[in-house]
Image: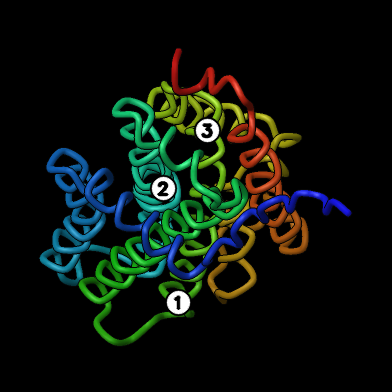
Amino acid sequence: MTTAPTVPLRPRPAYGASAWAILQLTLPRTFTAPVLAAMLLLLLMPMGFGVVFAAGGFLAGDPTAFLVQRYDQLVSALATPILALLLGTSAFSAEADDGTLIYLLTTPTPRWWIVTVRMLFAMTGTALLSLLTVYGTGYLVTGLYDPLQVTRAFGVAAAFGGAAYAALFTWLALRTRRALVSGLVYIVFWEGILSSTFPALHYLSVRQWMRAVASALTLAQDQRLTDGPSLRAALIGAAIVIVSTVIFGSRALARPRLTRTAS
């Protein structure tokens, strides 16, 4: 009597160990000297305006209006999206060039887990750095006093928007090897020009979602905080972006020809 040959089972991935291994590959490819210099500049730029405002004393004007304007223009429109772009695209782009991504795909680690770990890394880093520049600027302008909860509101909004941007740019890094350039075009034209010009696009703009979160948490009255989508729409939009990144990103990594890494 013959017995059927046993088929070796595919080893189950160790999610904790694989996450740590992915992070070990991610960190040196992300925090290169040019990226660190760009991040430092983005962090210090809003704070520099805060120093100038504080030096003006009573001649500087209303601190609440100043903070709303600077947070919206320098953090929501500039620092947070570019930080997310750098953290979301640097590692995948470097790994596509040196072949590390192909190595990752030959391991038993699920594709969705690779995408999720990278996305969570970019989301967490962007949120923390955005919080740092928001609270640093607020402290320079008003000290520990937070007029009308402006700093707290934009801190939460920046962390929220940073997470959404990071998920979006992680997906972009999986779709093209020119993710940095494509992301900059998206930030300048879609977020900076189109979504600000056409109200119908407010529901498809991460910057507008950030304004909705800030509007819900602050007592400040400013037209730019009331013209955007509702808080519910912002939360739903961000959730769709995050879930879509995991689903479509893992499908992109599962393609057998890996044209993304070989193009």
The answer to whether 145 appears left or right of 159 in the picture is: left
Q: Which element type, helix, strand or loop, lies under badge 3?
A: helix
Amino acid type of the residue that numbered disc 1 sits on in the rendered structure: Arg
Q: Amino acid at mark 3?
A: Leu
Q: Amino acid at mark 2?
A: Ala
Which of the labelled discs sits on residue 46, or is there none?
A: none
Residue at the far front in the pictured view = 1
Q: Position of residue 247 (x, y in %)?
A: 70, 45
The Cα atoms of the two marked residues, 2 and 1, are separated by 20 Å
- Camera-near label (2 vs 1) is 2
Name the residue at 50% across, 39% down.
105
Q: Mark 3 to mark 2: distance in Å?
A: 15 Å
**Is residue 94 positioned above or below 86 on the image?**
above
Give the image quarter of residue 96: top left
C-alpha distance separating marks 1 and 3: 34 Å
Q: Earlier in the sequence, mark 3 or mark 2?
A: 2
- For the residue pair 152 and 20, the one nearer the viewer reads as 20
Badge 2: few (under 14), some or many (20 or more) residues near its Cα, within 10 Å?
many
Q: What is the quadrant of the N terminus in the image?
A: bottom right
Relative to 207, 134 lies left or right: left
Q: Is residue 119 above or below residue 129?
A: above
Q: Which residue lies under the disc numbered 3?
A: 174
Numbered label attached to residue 84: 2
10 Å neighbourhood of mark 3: few (<14), some, or many (≥20)?
Answer: many
* Nearer to the camera, 28 or 141: 28
Q: Which mark is residue 152?
A: 1
Residue shown at 44%/32% (left/top)?
A: 102
